[in-house]
Amino acid sequence: MFTNQRILVPQCSFCYFVLLTMATFGVTTEKKQELVRLVDGSDRCSGHVQVKSDRSWSVVCHDVFDELDAEVACRELGCGFLDSLYGSTNELSQKTIWVDELQCTGTEKRLRDCPSVKNNTRFCETINTHLACRGHPRPPMVEVYSTYGEVELNWIDEYVLTIFKGHSFNIHCGFYKRFNASSARLTSRNIYIEKPSDPETHQFASFTFPAADDSHNDTYECDYNNEHRPEVFSSPRKLHIIVKEVRDVRLVNGSRCAGRLEVKHRSVWRPVSNKKNSWTLKEAAVVCRQLKCGTAVSTVYIDSMEVQPVWRFLSDCDGSEFALKACGAVKEWPSSSTVHVSCSDVLIPPTLSFYAFMKGFIDDQQEGVRMFRGHSFNINCTMPPLFPGGHFSLLINQIKKDTQPAVNHSALFHIPAVEQNHQGTISCVYHYLNQSSESRSLYLTVEDNTDVSLKSKDGTEAYCSGIVDLGFKDGWGLLSFQSTVWDLKHASLVCKRIGCGSAVATKADKIEHQGSMLRFLSDCDGSESALMDCGTVSQVYSSTAIHVTCTGHED
């Protein structure tokens, strides 16, 4: 292709040594010759391509000069990268036309390094080749994919994309095949991502964002580099992203985080049908996440028996998405069944129910409970049947006293004997997943007055031996020996209650006049703290009272 140059060796040993030294250290004896040039252009990096052949310049036939050859020519001229290449049939004063076909790979430093196929007989249809080079590769081609996104493109220099909050989007940077890109960069004020190009084609790189939020409101630039010159990146392509708030999902007829699901589609709100089981807890999880209501607790179908126009949701959701329409499609459908969703953030306070025995009562106005020391009481904590599982904690003065699993949406806490340290606020807390809710507080007052005593027949107080006088909600009364299942273990409950140890004897004690007494109906096993914790009383006319003798009695 190019003229061979010969070096004349002088006929002297010193001259030969000088030439050898110059060749060894890269010193040439004449100025490097220019072997390719661009003429008639706006600058030295644009114009018609000419190559030197046999000491003369020849016009390059465009039919045999492709983009890979042009890349090598731009590199040899020190002009960077190919910008444009085209041919023309204009007549030129220079009639010598180069028609040998170069077979450059695009990686060579000079055109003379490229193999060529000599063809002196080939006819050239396009006799003129125009080439323009630039310092950096062209900017990439940018495509943006977004679920339910609105794309506005300015194809000249910038792209504008409007996407919905919570929807995924992908920025796709495409490269010209001849550049054989090594990697691509996506940058903004908040991010810097560099990743290799597609390993098979080296023609694109994709940047995926799973869910758009306010932080993605930004201007991005995408550029790429060449594997042979990785230090040089292309001119960037700009992309403006606008994140738009979208409210196309809501829960109604309940609360913000629980109720019937409605979706806005084509500017119309309608309930969602469960037709063909296209709705599961995975889709419900996306709804709760989009509404910022935590996690999905349950989803149920309710049939109104009235067919109406609803939206049918065709799902491709895996439950991890941030917006419902980002993973499915909506179509009109007639149905009587609609979807209802409950999210974890809808946890309503549990219901606290107080159950006490003798001498305990509830004051609804002050939300207070008064009890005698030693009696037992129960606290029942209940939640509506919206949440499967979970557990309850009992708090006394905001200190956790016990925890039980929720069985049938409730838990029962038993306090066998109320003491002074139980006085204060009582509440229960329901825990589900990472959420919790607390019931109203109930204030407990503990009194030291006893509800049983031993008396002599004349009505005076007796010490650890006497007839049993029992207090109940309507007053006091002697305990009749007609009471059922009365034995020493029942008598011991009396002794223990008045601080006299255990019972050593119990018997019938006849009084002078028959009158109204109390008959004790027992369910006691002897382990209780007070009689009224394990039984109840009824009125009876009797002349025989119960007499109890305790170990603490002094003869």
Image: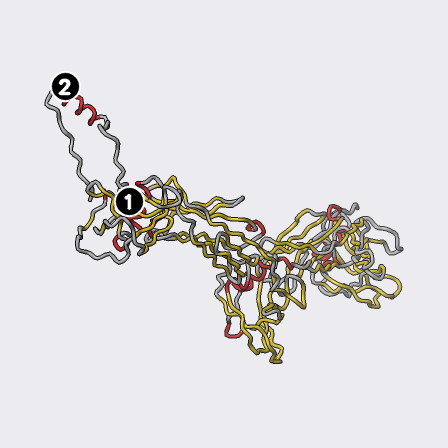
* Numbered tag placed on residue 107 in the rendering: 1
Which residue does the numbered mark 2 point to in the structure image? 14
Q: Residue at x 53, y 55 (%)?
A: 160
* Residue 531 percent across, percent down from the top left: 74, 57
Q: Residue furthest top?
A: 14
Which mark is nearer the camera, 2 or 1? 2
Q: Secondary structure at mark 2?
A: helix
Residue 260, placed above or below residue 195: below
Residue 346, placed above or below residue 75: below
The kind of residue on which mark 2 rests is: Phe
Q: Is residue 21 left or right of residue 316?
A: left
Q: Return the residue nearer the eye: 151 or 516.
A: 151
* Residue 504 percent across, percent down from the top left: 72, 52
* Residue 407 percent across, percent down from the top left: 60, 61
Q: Residue at x 88, y 52 (%)?
A: 460
User: Is residue 288 visible in the rendered structure shown here?
Assistant: yes
Q: Quadrant of residue 484?
A: bottom right
Q: Quadrant of residue 458?
A: bottom right
The kind of residue on which mark 1 rests is: Thr
Q: Residue furthest bottom?
A: 306
Q: Quadrant of the N terminus?
A: top left
